[in-house]
Image (tube, helix red, strand yellow):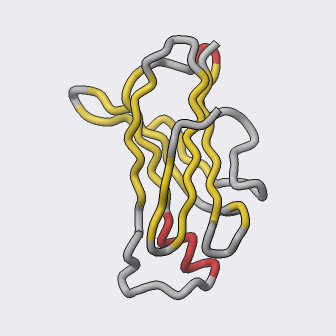
């Protein structure tokens, strides 16, 4: 069974990014379709997989994180407007039974991602 999950670490404050809003979009030739909107929990994750089993489909996707809004709520110093406001991670899931974990480490000034396990 295929599986997609995410995890956000707030490296500016040294903890999981609890309360960060994000969306998952499926990118298709004729446009994009929003699959879900969610908010990270106390561990910087969602309580369930973003896609799993019958909802999982290989293809190109975007995770769109509301980084500026999150760091404003946290009280972190930022530029005005924020240097990073919305961070979009575009990735492709090619394996029909693949486990895709797309984590992000983020500060108000930079981010990194990778394919996790």
Image quadrant holding the N terminus, namely top right
Does 4 sit above or below residue 7?
above
- Tell me where residue 15 sits by quadrant: bottom right
Q: Quick one: 41 or 115, which is closer to the camera?
A: 115
Which of the image's four quarters has the C terminus?
top right
Residue 42: give x, y in percent of width and height: 78, 58
Residue at position x 41%, y 41% in the image: 62
Name the residue at 62% across, 68% down: 11
Q: Residue at x 45, y 24 (%)?
A: 93
Q: How many marks?
A: 0
Q: Is residue 61 left or right of residue 117?
A: left
On screen, residue 68 above or below 16: below
The residue sitting at 48% across, 41% down in the picture is 24
Query: In this rendering, would 59 be left or right of 30?
Result: right
**Residue 85 image point, x, y percent:** 41, 69
Residue 1 against residue 75 in the figure, above or below: above
Residue 64 in the image, given as x and y percentages of width and height:
45, 51
Q: Along the horizontal axis of the image, is 95 left or right of 2? A: left
Give the image location of residue 109, x and y in percent: 45, 74
Q: Nearer the viewer, residue 78 or 70?
A: 78
Residue 38 placement, left or right of 84? right
Which of the 4 image quadrants contains residue 116? top right
């Amino acid at each position: 069974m295929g599986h997609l999950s995410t995890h956000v670490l707030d490296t500016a404050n040294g903890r999981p990014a609890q309360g960060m809003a994000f969306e998952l979009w499926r990118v298709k030739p004729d446009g994009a379709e929003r699959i879900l909107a969610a908010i990270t929990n106390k561990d910087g994750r969602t309580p369930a997989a973003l896609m799993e089993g019958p909802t999982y489909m290989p293809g190109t996707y975007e995770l769109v994180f509301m980084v500026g809004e999150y760091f404003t709520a946290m009280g972190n110093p930022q530029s005005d407007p924020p240097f990073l406001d919305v961070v979009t991670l575009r990735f492709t899931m090619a394996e029909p039974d693949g486990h895709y974990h797309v984590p992000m480490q983020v500060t108000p000034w930079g981010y990194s991602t990778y394919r996790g396990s």
